[in-house]
């Protein structure tokens, strides 16, 4: 006899084709009913509240008087909560976001009762290979997932899932989803007929006689009559024994069988039984870019700055920072960050991210101001704070914008030594917008607005250095620029021909890359969920549409700017007729710093066309069957073309497993002698074209006009979501994209990884002008002109420096970006250093090496 574990639950989308306001209104009545039913019948429960504590937060925002009742049921174990704050996407959002999701989710659970110790991920559009690692770092040993699994990965729906670092969790798949047993009839005979079909599918891949039966659905009422109905079925048949259960009880039963489960390592992005919606990696790229910018601003700038100021005795606004993270995570659900929503919801998602950036930037400005205020000047002039969040001493180039009435100026360090700079952009600024006191003036005060590239050195690790802007004083060097027709330094050469075709030469290996960074525009007959090419696509490249090319060599870097007016179809109808009746105005600025081994690329596009996709191509010339991309806290190897593409139509998969992949910010293809790597800012999608498997195509944007559509080439059958117009997903107007391009001459060696980390560049410069929109009283503290919290000499890549979540200590984290174990190195600081998990709990052993795809975290008490 098979034991069927009935797990009653709800799946709570906070927003989708409806808004979070709609959701909260429904939640009020859903929870009111749930509490009443559980209180009235003590035999009911446990009930899984979708594994995300934001549901509690939302409910109490509309029903704060119900907290005591809710707390009681949670403490009794009749409502199960956590471990997440929100049900996040795991392929698009960043590693620190996933970490904070669990950290804040656990904190919520501790306030209300116990944490459900199961990594419940019911509806993520694919599963990251790193999920077992994240769960184990929070002492979670089991996971329940949907989407992304098929027998091509592992033959059974229960297995041991292994991350690359060795973390392992017992995993159960819901092969037919969390709603497979929704809306069961109350009458036993009718229910038995329905359950025969359901359980035949549920048991198809089972390893044992224990079967999960999730009973619930999207925003669906509590089916409180089902347990009693199943009790009656137990008396009427002997094929199944139904038990009121939980995910934890199911895993206990699974363990009691003592069966050896199959082991699987890797990501789960197979769309055989349920759609993965690979188009969401590039849908609403404006939202993706905003989210990446907010994640970087928080973890790579604001939190490290607050940590340094906290060491000086300034307050650390923990709740304010947590609230920014929480608002960001409300935009991280699979629909929300995927952009597969109504236009109204996408606007709300974007607004949350923009609001978070506003708050974060204001906190940065105020804390930079307080820091500068406490530094006693060593030279005349305005203080320039160069802030370095990374745990190693840094040198290089940093951008700084100044406003000055003077034609001449110079920058010096504390000893009076002059720093070199280069103006990369100049204009005029109405200072009444900058200086509050001038806003009521009857005359306009105009200053020069100069965006500088400043050369700095010996910037302390996890700390800062003070420089000085001296106005009205001539610089001791000539900042004049000269016209050039190519870019070249010690390592690289880039040349553009008359048609704008670019050729990159790696002077270290003499390998060349022809027609690099070519732009290709094609049709998109898809929707917000999926890219889908038209049945007869018309691809148009940028090669024939260049309008200008100009170059400039400066003191610190040289740049080449190309412009195109690409003539493309205005929509799908025009593309089908091969009628080019719209123009895309595009500019690409390629920058090569004299001391850098990589090329910086900035692309601006005025998007005036509909129903299309624009990609930038990186032809590697590498004859390999695999390539690599980054994932949260790690690197993953993928096939250029999934082998399942050969069988998906015959086996009637829900969508094609096309070579359209997610990345965090990096994709590369290489052999021992040549290769290319792109490091992007907020671009999350790339493709390996089926007919050109040595090419990496990075998606810049895709424009579609529907939330869901039916019968697409890559996704036949029903529409996903709702057949709802979403014209704002055509994302018309100006868009700006950035990436860095690295040529690889010796595989992914240590020098390459150091360049990748440097190319991500996160030195920050701030000018203490004395102007401010907001006044604060002096804090009266005195700070040194340069300072370092700690030094961590390691090849690991930096993740964050922050205050500990629940104690007066600091947390520093880095991660191994390579496919091999590397030395952890030593953290040098004045405090006591304790190795810790992502959950910030103490580890008993300090490992000398860090495994591939693993973070290393230390808690420092002073």
Image (spheres, rainbow, N blue to C red):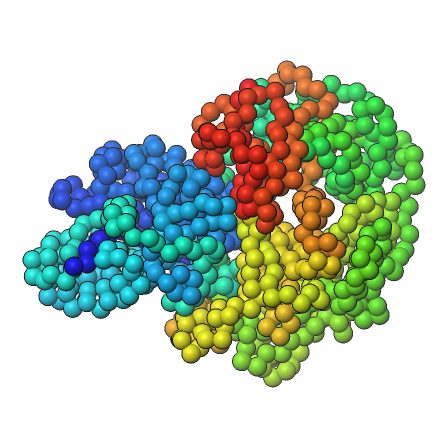
Would you place residue 40 above or below residue 602 in this image? above
In the picture provided, is 169 more to the left or to the right than 404?
left
Q: Is residue 768 visible?
A: no
Rendered residue at 68%/60% (across/down): 671
* Image quarter (top left, top right, bottom left or bottom right) of the N terminus: bottom left
Asked whether 21 or 321 is in front, the reply is: 321
* Quadrant in the picture for residue 847: top right
Residue that sits furthest to the bottom in the current view? 577
Residue 151 location (% of width, % of height): 39, 65
Asked whether 278 or 231 is in front, the reply is: 231
Residue that sits furthest to the left in the current view? 235
Rendered residue at 22%/68% (across/down): 197
Rendered residue at 83%/23% (across/down): 415
In the picture provided, is 563 more to the left or to the right than 756?
right
* Quadrant in the picture for residue 377: top right
Q: Is residue 433 visible?
A: yes
In the picture provided, is 44 more to the left or to the right than 632?
left
Residue 319 location (% of width, % of height): 47, 31
Residue 421 location (% of width, % of height): 83, 39
Rendered residue at 79%/20% (across/down): 378
In the picture provided, is 238 more to the left or to the right than 539?
left
* Image quarter (top left, top right, bottom left or bottom right) of the C terminus: top right
Asked whether 567 or 250 is in front, the reply is: 250
Would you place residue 695 above or below residue 353 in this image? below
Would you place residue 657 above or below residue 378 in this image? below
Would you place residue 748 above or below residue 151 in this image? above
Asked whether 581 or 205 is in front, the reply is: 205
* Quadrant in the picture for residue 150: bottom left
Q: What is the count of numbered marks?
A: 0
């Amino acid at each position: 006899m098979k034991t069927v574990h009935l797990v009653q639950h709800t799946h709570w989308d906070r927003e989708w084709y409806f808004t979070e306001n709609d959701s909260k209104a429904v939640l009020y009545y859903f929870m009111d009913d749930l509490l009443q039913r559980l209180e009235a019948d003590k035999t009911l429960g446990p009930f899984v509240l979708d594994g995300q504590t934001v549901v509690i937060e939302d409910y109490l925002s509309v029903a704060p008087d119900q907290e005591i009742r809710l707390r009681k049921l949670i403490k009794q174990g009749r409502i199960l909560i956590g471990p997440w704050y929100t049900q996040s996407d795991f392929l698009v959002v960043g590693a620190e976001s996933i970490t904070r999701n669990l950290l804040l989710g656990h904190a919520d659970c501790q306030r209300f009762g116990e944490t459900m110790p199961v990594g419940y991920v019911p509806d993520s559009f694919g599963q990251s290979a790193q999920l077992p690692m994240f769960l184990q770092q929070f002492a979670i040993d089991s996971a329940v997932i949907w989407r992304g699994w098929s027998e091509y990965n592992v033959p059974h729906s229960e297995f041991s899932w292994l991350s690359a670092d060795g973390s392992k969790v017992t995993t159960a798949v819901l092969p037919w989803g969390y709603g497979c047993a929704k809306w069961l009839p109350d009458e036993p005979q009718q229910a038995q007929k329905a359950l025969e079909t359901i359980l035949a599918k549920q048991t198809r891949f089972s390893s044992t006689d224990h079967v999960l039966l999730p009973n619930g659905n999207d925003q669906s009422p509590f089916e409180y009559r089902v347990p009693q109905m199943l009790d009656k079925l137990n008396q009427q048949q002997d094929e199944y024994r139904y038990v009121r259960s939980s995910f934890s009880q199911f895993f206990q039963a699974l363990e009691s069988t003592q069966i050896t489960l199959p082991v699987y390592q890797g990501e789960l992005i197979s769309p055989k039984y349920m759609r993965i919606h690979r188009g969401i990696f590039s849908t609403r790229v404006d939202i993706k870019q905003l989210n990446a910018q907010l994640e970087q601003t928080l973890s790579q700038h604001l939190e490290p700055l607050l940590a340094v100021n906290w060491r000086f005795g300034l307050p650390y606004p923990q709740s304010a920072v947590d609230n920014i993270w929480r608002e960001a995570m409300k935009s991280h659900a699979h629909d929300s960050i995927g952009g597969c929503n109504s236009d109204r919801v996408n606007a709300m998602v974007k607004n949350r991210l923009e609001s978070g950036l506003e708050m974060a930037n204001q906190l940065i400005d105020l804390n930079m101001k307080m820091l500068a205020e406490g530094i006693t000047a060593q030279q005349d002039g305005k203080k320039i704070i160069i802030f370095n969040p990374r745990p190693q001493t840094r040198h290089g180039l940093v951008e700084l914008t100044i406003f000055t009435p003077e034609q001449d100026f110079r920058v010096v360090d504390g000893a009076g030594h002059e720093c070199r700079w280069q103006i990369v952009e100049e204009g005029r600024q109405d200072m009444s917008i900058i200086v509050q006191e001038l806003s009521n003036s009857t005359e306009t005060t105009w200053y020069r607005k100069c965006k500088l590239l400043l050369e700095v050195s010996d910037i302390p690790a996890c700390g800062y250095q003070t420089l000085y802007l001296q106005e009205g004083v001539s610089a001791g060097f000539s900042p004049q620029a000269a016209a050039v027709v190519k870019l070249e330094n010690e390592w690289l050469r880039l040349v553009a021909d008359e048609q704008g075709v670019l050729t990159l030469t790696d002077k270290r290996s003499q390998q060349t890359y022809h027609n690099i960074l070519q732009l290709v525009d094609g049709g998109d007959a898809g929707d917000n969920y999926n890219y889908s090419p038209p049945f007869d696509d018309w691809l148009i490249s940028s090669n024939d549409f260049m309008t200008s090319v100009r170059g400039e060599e400066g003191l610190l870097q040289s740049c080449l700017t190309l412009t195109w007016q690409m003539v493309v179809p205005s929509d799908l109808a025009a593309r089908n007729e091969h009628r080019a009746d719209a123009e895309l105005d595009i500019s690409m600025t390629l920058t090569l710093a004299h001391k850098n081994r990589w090329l910086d690329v900035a692309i601006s596009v005025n998007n005036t066309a509909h129903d299309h996709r624009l990609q930038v191509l990186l032809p590697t010339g590498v004859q390999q069957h695999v390539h690599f991309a980054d994932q949260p806290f790690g690197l993953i190897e993928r096939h250029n073309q999934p082998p399942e593409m050969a069988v998906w139509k015959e086996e009637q998969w829900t969508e094609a497993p096309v070579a359209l992949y997610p990345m965090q910010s990096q994709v590369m293809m290489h052999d021992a002698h040549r290769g290319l790597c792109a490091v992007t800012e907020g671009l999350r999608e790339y493709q390996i074209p089926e007919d050109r498997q040595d090419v990496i195509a990075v998606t810049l944007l895709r424009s579609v006009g529907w939330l869901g559509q039916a019968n697409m080439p890559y996704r036949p059958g029903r529409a996903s979501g709702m057949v709802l117009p979403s014209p704002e997903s055509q994302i018309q107007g100006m868009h700006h994209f950035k990436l860095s391009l690295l040529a690889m001459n010796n595989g992914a060696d240590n020098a390459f990884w150091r360049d990748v980390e440097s190319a991500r560049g996160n030195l920050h410069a701030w000018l203490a002008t004395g102007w401010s929109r907001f006044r604060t009283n002096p804090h009266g503290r005195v700070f040194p002109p340069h300072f370092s919290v700690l030094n961590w000499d390691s090849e690991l890549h930096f993740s964050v420096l922050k205050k500990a979540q629940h104690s007066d200590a600091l947390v520093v984290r880095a991660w191994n970006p390579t496919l091999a174990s590397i030395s952890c190195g030593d953290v040098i600081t004045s405090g006591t250093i304790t190795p810790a998990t992502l959950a910030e709990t103490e580890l008993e052993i300090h490992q000398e090496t860090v495994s591939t795809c693993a973070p290393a975290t230390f808690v420092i008490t002073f």
